[in-house]
Image (cartoon, rainbow, N blue to C red):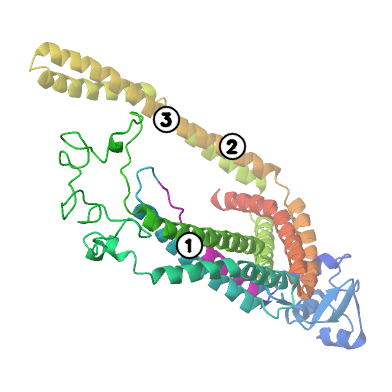
Amino acid sequence: MSGSVQFSNYQWLVASLDTNNNGKMEELKAEAHLQRQVDADGNGEISRQELVSALQADRVEIRQGQILQGRGFQIHVEGLETLKNVRSISQNGISSTHVWSPNFYSDDTSRDRYHKLAESNRAYSSSIDKMESALRSIVSITDGKTDATSRALNIQARTTLNSTRWSTWNARLQQSLSSTQPWFNDYTPGMRSQQSNGISSQQAYGSDPFAGGGNSIGSEPYGKDPFNGGGNSSDPYGKDPFNGGGRPSDPNQPVIPHDPYEDRLLPHIREQEMIFSNLQSSYEVMNNALKAIKEQTNNLPDLPATVKATDANIARTFANLSAIESSSKSAAEVARNIRSSADATEAKATGRAAPFAGIGAGVGLVAGGAIGYFAGGQHLKSAALGAGIGSAASAGIGALIGSGIDASYKGEASSLRALAGQVESYQPAQDKQTVIQANQNFYNQLFEARNARDLDRARVVDNSISGINQQVQPALQRSSTILDAYRKY
């Protein structure tokens, strides 16, 4: 990532370096050619303003008490933009997946189990496709990068793809072979094939109990109706095949009907279970890898943004302090005006609880009486009862409203008096010294930012500059509050 940043507080920086406050920068050393370059009026001396102008034009810079040739503040962190793209890819790779594991119930038929597994496997396969694509993209954009983080992520993505290749390939091969089998067509509702008629009990998948001749009794060409008396038992009404065939069973347990296709579907269910196991394994490995990659690319240092934010806050604090110091009003005058406003505000709290209660009672009396009269069958007794209830309830509500308004005025007055105390006790010189020191430290950190080529070093510098910004924040907040008081009062 590359970006040029500007330091905007040179005036304050140079003033802080003029320790004897004589307007001449004799505290700094400079080679002859740089002296001539900065000394615009040619008087053999470098003034504050001459140095500020040279610094703003990037002709020179100040380091360790010396005026040196300026190089500007171009910040470049190797691989940062790449890592931002990696974070985006990994986040999209995780968020675009949706999988679920099948839930099986005791009354599921073999076809139910098969379909649940097949649907779950399709969802896993689709999600794996997206995560594989994300991992391949990460490998591609980090390939050949020289920073340590990009190299580590490249290895991690490659390792993940290699470790899941076999299980993913095996599952997809099984899915491909499974999808070419026509065996399931004759079990689709309304499409059962008639070729199964007459299958003998010696065949691999057994006989169809609903097809004529396959399990016929006697000379019946289409077999016996199991629900017709005498068809398959001595019971005159036959045995209910959905009641355990007449065998003793636990009356508290549901009776599961016999699945006539289970023996035929079982091998394919086992196949889908193997596919599910392989796909789930690959999914977990890829998903965890993408989450780890995303975690490693979170909170990437954005040095240009941190520098700009810190520079702006220092400039705002200096501007606030200058405005306070140059104000025509004194702190005592502003505090006095604020207290006068507080007194006027508190005077508005006139004890509204009783008047508002009376107003509420009157309104409640009328409304309650009317409601009681009509709701109570237009009797005067009901009207009187309603009026009493309405008056009492509304009086209480009115008192609460009045009391709340008074409390609001009193709270505002209390806040104003606290502000007056802050204005009187505020010491702008202390905040100015804090910000001057922070400004010097910030300027020195810009050289570190310029030399922070790798991500790890950039993170250290970013944290240091952020720490300077945090030091400035309290002074910025205090000066903003005080300046606002000066402007209002």
Question: Looking at numbered disc 3 in the image, what kind of residue is underneath it?
Answer: Gly
Residue at the spot x=41%, y=32% of the render? 405
Is 429 one of the magenta-colored residues? no
SS of the residue at dot 3? helix
Q: Upstream in the sequence, badge 1 or badge 2?
A: 1
Question: Looking at numbered disc 1 in the image, what kind of residue is underneath it?
Answer: Tyr
Q: Residue furthest top?
A: 381
Q: In the image, which is nearer the foreground, mark 1 or mark 2?
A: 1
Residue at the spot x=56%, y=38% of the render? 415
**Residue at which label 2 appears:** 417
Over which residues does the magenta segment extend? 82-104
Instruction: Check the picture and name the quadrant holding the N terminus.
Output: bottom right
**Residue at which label 1 appears:** 124
Question: Looking at numbered disc 2 in the image, what kind of residue is underneath it?
Answer: Arg
SS of the residue at dot 1? helix
Indicate which disc residue 404 carries. Answer: 3
Q: CA distance from mark 3 to mark 1?
A: 60 Å
Residue at the spot x=19%, y=33% of the render? 235
Q: Upstream in the sequence, badge 3 or badge 1?
A: 1
